[in-house]
Image (cartoon, rainbow, N blue to C red):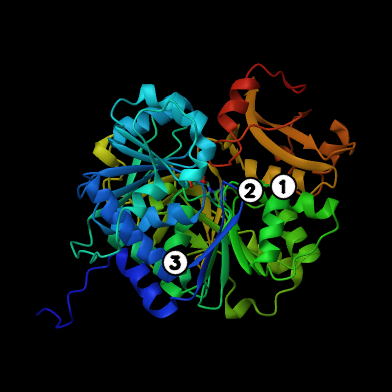
């Protein structure tokens, strides 16, 4: 027997319609690429999204068609999120930090005909245009006064497009499993792979992200996503904020310490989200200028492991509670967020920090397990480390156009490629990316654990650990360190720093000091580049 509740498909358009009706006065504030701060409300954003649909239809955009964006976090990008998906087409957010060949590949693979871009990407778009013959129209996300002088073919001005249209448009209702968004993985091995989100997966993910033990957003929140809207939908925040009516602050291209700090302060931002590297820059700027936050209370940090030193600095020096989060493009992206339980109330500060370093518990909607090399489920004891597998309504089932092989295990789980432990309370701790695990003799050494210790040294700005060839052990850890400006620390001091903190056999065999470390397009340490660069490195122990 079927239930007798209404059939009401989960539509992305219902999020913005809800925000207009119930939080119509709440602001969306953006730092524009052109310079000034732009300020309007959910009501305005809803009206302009509908104008944009009318413009897209005039450009011949059909349901199911992919529409590309090369853009920062800003109000026009937000309008594209809602207009494109809401009309039944697919918003394809392109990561401008990828290599030119990867960009060409994904634009062609997606079949983008229209690409919207922010002005900072004019030089990039000029390089892309001759390589992407499938793109017939390039739309500059600006007004007439700021239109670039560019030889680009079929160049259109965003504000001209909108000005020609009214906002008379009723959002269509269709199957909630319809595709809504497309985002490619950064493709560290082979071509980037397309992950195709649906209306249903996006709305369910946004609801889960708002829960109190997840990000806990409400109509009283002021949220600034530092994580870009081209990096897995800014972790779902552009959908979650209208769902609860939170004020949304979008930082545009100003992701440096100064610009971020000023926006946090001027807009009364209370909560944020970003990868560890942007926080490094912000913390450094604030320390150099002796600044404090007046409103920021918490932030989610994920995308890479948040080092304990960063968590401690944010907590003790800046009064900011860090919530560790873990996920991936294939998971929309949020899988776990770290929040304490009632039983943790009486933990000491140090015990709380140790708990916060775990990547957290799965949100309802994500089932998770870890398995050993033989594929057998491991005990949930917080000790046994194995391949982390997930399944759920916002986990991918297949890559776009099937290019990426069969991503699921025979019994329908998605192997994340991460290695970790799960404890009896459900907390996940990632020990490594499976490709980055250092296999020394029969033992596995966690590069994340070694990096976390290195960056807790007062002279260390950033650190990476990779496995390099060793004739006896197969691989041994090599530590690469970027010192803080003006700081001095020697190789021996660095190695001594590990004493008593971890088992002797997992202490790195060597240390190399470098000027900087390479990062991927999504801000992670590029271990692949480092392994390539140091593949001839001879360890003193070899
Ligand atoms: P992406 O698809 O670019 O979001 O990258 C996903 C990958 O980032 C995951 O598979 C992890 O390897 C890594 N990652 C994300 N969050 C964390 C975290 N909190 N700690 C460690 N690694 C993380």
Mark 1 and mark 3 lie on one chain; the one further toward the N terminus is 3
**Could you say whether the residue bearing mark 2 is in a helix, strand or loop?**
loop
Residue linked to disc 2:
255
Residue at 62% x, 43% y: name it: 446
Residue linked to disc 1:
281
The mark lying in front, picked from 3 and 2, is 2
Quadrant of the snapshot with the C terminus: top right
Q: CA distance from mark 1 to mark 3?
A: 26 Å
- Is residue 313 at all visible to an observer of this figure? yes
Mark 3 and mark 2 lie on one chain; the one further toward the N terminus is 3
Q: CA distance from mark 1 to mark 2?
A: 9 Å
Question: Quarter of the image holding residue 128?
Answer: top left
Which one is in front, 77 or 346?
77
Q: Residue 523: x, y in percent?
A: 58, 41
Q: Residue 373: x, y in percent?
A: 43, 42
Residue linked to disc 3:
240
Q: Residue furthest top?
A: 536
Which one is in front, 304 or 87?
87
Q: Around disc 1, counting alpha carbons within 10 Å, would you say few (fewer than 14), some (14 to 19), or many (20 or more)?
A: some
Mark 1 and mark 2 lie on one chain; the one further toward the N terminus is 2
Q: Residue 160: x, y in percent?
A: 38, 48
């Amino acid at each position: 027997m079927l239930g007798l509740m209404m059939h009401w498909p989960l539509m992305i358009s219902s999020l913005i319609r809800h925000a207009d009706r119930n939080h119509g006065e709440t602001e969306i504030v953006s730092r524009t690429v052109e310079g000034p701060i732009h300020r309007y409300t959910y009501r305005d954003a809803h009206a302009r999204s509908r104008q944009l649909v009318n413009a897209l239809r005039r450009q011949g955009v059909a349901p199911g068609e992919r529409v590309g964006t090369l853009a920062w976090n800003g109000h026009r990008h937000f309008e594209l999120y809602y207009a494109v998906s809401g009309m039944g087409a697919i918003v394809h957010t392109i990561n401008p930090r990828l290599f030119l060949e990867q960009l060409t590949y994904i634009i062609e693979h997606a079949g983008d005909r229209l690409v919207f871009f922010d002005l900072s990407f004019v030089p990039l778009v000029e390089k892309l245009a001759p390589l992407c013959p499938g793109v017939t129209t390039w739309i500059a996300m600006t007004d007439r006064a700021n239109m670039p002088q560019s030889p680009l073919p079929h160049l259109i001005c965003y504000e001209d497009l909108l000005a020609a249209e009214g906002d008379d448009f009723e959002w269509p209702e269709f199957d909630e499993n319809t595709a809504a968004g497309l985002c490619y993985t950064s493709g560290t091995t082979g071509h980037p792979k397309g992950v195709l989100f649906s209306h249903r997966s996006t709305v369910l993910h946004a609801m889960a992200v708002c829960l109190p033990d997840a990000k806990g957003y409400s109509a009283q929140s002021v949220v600034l996503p530092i994580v870009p809207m081209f990096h897995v939908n800014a972790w779902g925040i552009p959908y979650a904020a209208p769902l609860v009516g939170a004020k949304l602050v979008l930082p545009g291209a100003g992701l440096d310490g100064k610009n971020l700090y000023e926006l946090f302060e001027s807009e009364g931002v209370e909560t944020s989200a970003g990868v560890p590297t942007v926080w490094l820059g912000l913390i450094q700027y604030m320390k150099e200028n002796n600044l404090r936050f007046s409103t920021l209370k918490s932030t989610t940090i994920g995308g890479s492991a948040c080092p304990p030193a960063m968590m401690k600095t944010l907590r003790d020096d800046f009064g900011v509670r860090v919530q560790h989060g873990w996920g991936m493009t294939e998971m929309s992206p949020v899988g776990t967020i770290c929040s304490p339980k009632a039983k943790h109330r009486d933990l000491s500060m140090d015990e709380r920090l140790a708990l916060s370093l775990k990547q957290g518990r799965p949100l309802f909607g994500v089932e998770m397990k870890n398995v050993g090399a033989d594929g057998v489920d491991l005990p949930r004891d917080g000790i046994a480390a194995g391949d982390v597998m997930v399944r759920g309504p916002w986990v991918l089932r297949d890559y776009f156009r099937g290019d990426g092989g069969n991503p699921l295990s025979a019994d329908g789980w998605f192997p994340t490629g991460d290695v970790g432990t799960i404890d009896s309370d459900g907390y996940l701790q990632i020990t490594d990316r499976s490709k980055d695990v250092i296999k020394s003799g029969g033992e596995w050494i966690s590069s994340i654990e070694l990096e976390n210790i290195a960056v807790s040294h007062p002279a260390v700005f950033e650190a990476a650990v990779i496995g390099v060839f060793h004739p006896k052990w197969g691989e041994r850890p090599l530590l690469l360190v970027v010192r803080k400006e003006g700081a001095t620390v020697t190789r021996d001091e660095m190695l001594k720093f590990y004493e008593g903190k971890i088992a002797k056999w997992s202490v790195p065999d060597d240390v190399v000091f470098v000027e900087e470390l390479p990062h991927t397009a999504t801000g992670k340490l590029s271990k692949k580049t480092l392994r390539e660069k140091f593949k001839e490195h001879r360890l003193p122990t070899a």
